[in-house]
Image (cartoon, rainbow, N blue to C red):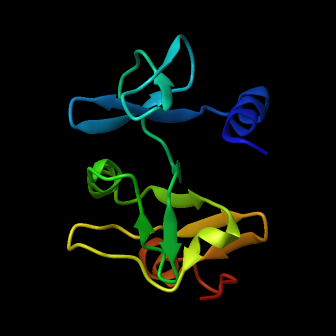
């Protein structure tokens, strides 16, 4: 299922869906409603909308390592967003072939809590520590 279909299904279920909207050198979580356009990064985003509290972030990536660190598209937008929203569940969306042993890391990088691929869901070790998930099924 693609991201657009996922958003549509969540909306049909009455869930509030927020998606990233670029504002200057930052991203905010804006409601997935109203007029949309492609950003300078080629990502479909709302043309308007205020920063909205969200519980889960579905995150794009080029690659992800076994510790949940992602290789993004550059700029550090998501890492800055995650520093501003430390309690938000960070979930990567990828194909299993994008999982690698390690990706380059910088001091400001924030790891994902989980990853969804066509093979299933992977919960990373940091999710148990940061989110106080006791006894969760996970693998590294």
> At 31% across and 57% down in the image, what residue appears?
79
> At 61% across and 67% down in the image, what residue appears?
115
> At 40% across and 15% down in the image, what residue appears?
48
Residue 26 figure quarter: top left
Where residue 9 appears, x then y in whole percent? 78, 34
Position of 9 relative to 129 (above/below): above
Where residue 114 appears, x then y in whole percent? 58, 68
Closer to the camera, 114 or 86? Answer: 114
> At 27% across and 53% down in the image, what residue appears?
76
Q: In which quarter of the image is the N terminus?
A: top right
Closer to the camera, 123 or 2? Answer: 2
Please indicate whether residue 26 sits to the left or right of residue 29 in the image.
Answer: left
Give the number of marks. Answer: 0
Residue 41 figure quarter: top left
Q: In which quarter of the image is the C terminus?
A: bottom right
Residue 117 figure quarter: bottom right
């Amino acid at each position: 299922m693609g991201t657009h279909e996922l958003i549509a299904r969540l909306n049909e279920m009455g869930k509030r869906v927020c998606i990233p909207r670029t504002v200057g050198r930052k991203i905010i979580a804006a409601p997935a409603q109203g007029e949309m356009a492609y950003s300078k990064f080629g990502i479909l985003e709302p043309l308007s909308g205020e920063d909205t509290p969200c519980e889960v972030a579905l995150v794009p990536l080029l690659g992800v390592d076994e510790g949940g660190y992602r290789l993004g598209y550059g700029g550090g937008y998501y890492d800055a967003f995650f520093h501003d929203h430390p309690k938000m569940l960070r979930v990567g969306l990828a194909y299993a072939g994008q999982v690698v042993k390690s990706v380059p890391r910088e001091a400001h990088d924030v790891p994902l809590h989980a990853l969804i691929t066509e093979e299933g869901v992977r919960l990373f070790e940091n999710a148990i520590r940061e989110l106080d998930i006791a006894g969760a099924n996970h693998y590294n």
